[in-house]
Amino acid sequence: MVTISDVAKRSGLSKSTVSRVINNHPYISKEKRELVQKAMEELGYYPNPAARRLRGQLKSTIGVIVPRIVNPFFSYLVNSIEQTAFEHNFQVLIFQSNENKEKELSFLNLLKTRQIDGIILTAIENDADTIHSYTQYGPILFCNEYLNHSTIPSIRVDQSKGAYLGTKHLIEQGHSKIAYCTGGLFAEDGKDKDRNQGYQKALNEAGLSLNPNWIFVDQHSIQDGKSVLQQILKMDDRPTAIFTGSDEVAAGVMIEANDQNVKVPENLAVIGFDDQPLAEMLHPKLTTIKQPISLMGEKAVEGLVTMMQENSTIPENIELPVELIERKST
Amino acid sequence: MVTISDVAKRSGLSKSTVSRVINNHPYISKEKRELVQKAMEELGYYPNPAARRLRGQLKSTIGVIVPRIVNPFFSYLVNSIEQTAFEHNFQVLIFQSNENKEKELSFLNLLKTRQIDGIILTAIENDADTIHSYTQYGPILFCNEYLNHSTIPSIRVDQSKGAYLGTKHLIEQGHSKIAYCTGGLFAEDGKDKDRNQGYQKALNEAGLSLNPNWIFVDQHSIQDGKSVLQQILKMDDRPTAIFTGSDEVAAGVMIEANDQNVKVPENLAVIGFDDQPLAEMLHPKLTTIKQPISLMGEKAVEGLVTMMQENSTIPENIELPVELIERKST
DNA sequence: AAAAAATCTGAAACCAGTTTCATATAAGTT
DNA sequence: AACTTATATGAAACTGGTTTCAGATTTTTT
């Protein structure tokens, strides 16, 4: 292992001078700088990151917590985060919370023990106070999530707008009986979640009232979507359109619809959320709300990198725009 | 920041003794051990990983290189690796090579600079000698990849068997005109890749000869699959069945087949590779070769952890079994 | 020409741990 | 009782860097 002392010896200078060259300090003569650089090259020297980190210099690792990496939404988000981090010379430590409070905590603790220099949280399992208490150990940033009244900066999309756009689109297609699938109805503070507000707003504007039978909560997977369609088929008063919380749930609805000879969009219009590659593979191709996943990842990394710099201002909350992608399922 | 000196002071003992307690050394009296533990708890002390790592003690981080995390095969593999690493108290640094030599190298360099304590390579971009030269800096293990004549241990599935099973299955269904899609035809040493051998072996056993027109190379994506079907439709002598290199390519073939009114499996039998969730979503459901992805991830982490321990033997190459999952597309 | 400021360099302290070495006491053997 | 051996602890050295402090030299200002 080549150390800074070896470089110092070889160049006939002191460790201090070598260190200054490494860190681009001012006040080194060109002559000595070149001597050091030559020696470093000849020896194949690389500074030991553990040593730099120990002295409090090195910041190099971003931790990302996702519920599950196999969920395409999150694998695309991680993709973007990794690419952006690489451009900023940061590495990405990945964690899956598996929707488990303890696992999330054990990851947050890596911030406390200085194993990571900042965290991007893409989902929250523990309560606001707990999460908040970790901000004392290092920068934390939400991506695709947020807590009300929290000072933790967040990068997210305008979910309410997404649901509004989707629901309004269905209404414009002539539908008045619109079902709604979601992951959860309420945010952690008991208030309605953003998406639901968008759904209701669109209904209200059209003078439509909400039918509680058509609201499906806790729907996440393809399997969930299949079961939603089965439930709909059992109803006497069936919705003619459905807004789903994710392309996967939409896919489940459409696959089951196909199996049950329910025609999409004639008998049931379906709209998804995310615009995953999946959306273009389905038959008919899925109309969906596109989230700017890549952009979210970029902004999240950039925000966190800013926070990790000394004396930097905390980035603002950013709300990114969503977009209706009209295909053939509506 | 609470340090080991603070703990020493508080417990009235020396740093050495505290360190011994932390590292479970023998020859510490119960009495002192408890004093130290009490002090650590009272102060909320956590050893600084950078300091431990500097002294060469701490091994905590596994690097994983995948071509792209959004490829479901790799996101499932990473999922398994992360879960297993967590159980072994290791963290996972994730890298995407994007099939880029330089990016792969820059990640391998993290081993040299001690930012990671071992690497799992799930794909190889650089040549054998280059990869090999990095083994001097730390343990490297292949997962889903290997180099012939290499001393680097590998965890992989029996690809040849997979192709053999799939092709044989098609033959048993009465097909004699069987097309073949693959990522690449030759391994890095110029020899046929394993899968191709399995395909040819099955053909040979049935006394069938290979039609070069029906071999499609460099096929990876859904889009590739679509284009394969279009090419097949232009042929005078069309295959009646196709073995594809991945469920995604198979999906592309089937989606395009549906658009072109080619009935699967009546007009064209399709078989995939991987058994991704996608396989069950297609219509008809996709017959495919199942790879034990989770098991591969587990074995890879366990192998690497073994290699990271001092004086440990290098794990053997492990070849995991594949399985034919018969569904409705054949 | 003198004073002040800017440029350049090295010795030593420091970061937070682990390990070696030395030493002391207790326990076991002949 | 004398001699090993096992147990237990602390001081100091060590890991590989960065930073402070002090001093030397050069350049600029008065």
Image (spheres, coloured by chain):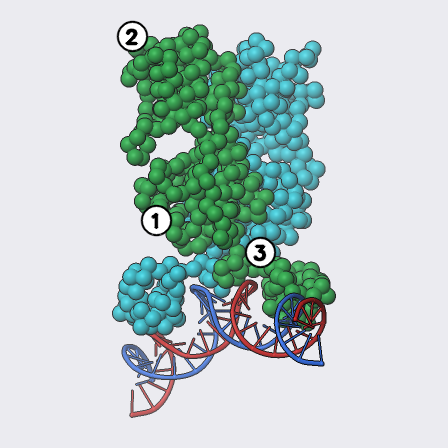
Chain colours: A green, B cyan, C blue, D red
**Residue B48: mark in rendering:** none
Q: Nearer the viewer, residue B271 or A243?
A: A243
**SS of the residue at dot 2?**
loop
Which mark lies nearer to you, 1 or 2? 1
Which image quarter is the N terminus of chain B in?
Answer: bottom left
Q: Position of residue B294 (x, y in %)?
A: 45, 37
**Residue identified by numbered label 1:** A133
The type of residue carrying mark 3 is Thr
Task: Give the CA distance from mark 3 to mark 2.
Answer: 67 Å
Which mark lies nearer to you, 1 or 3? 1
Q: Position of residue B90 (x, y in %)?
A: 44, 50
Q: Residues within 10 Å of mark 3 (few under 14, many from 20)?
A: some
The type of residue carrying mark 2 is Asp
Give the vertical position of B22 relative to B163 (above or below).
below
**Residue identified by numbered label 3:** B113
The type of residue carrying mark 1 is Ser
Task: Give the CA distance from mark 1 to mark 3.
Answer: 33 Å
Q: Residue at x 52, y 42 (%)?
A: A302
Mark 1 and mark 2 lie on one chain; the one further toward the N terminus is 1
Residue under mark 2: which chain is it in? A
**Residue A236: mark in rendering:** 2
**SS of the residue at dot 1?**
helix
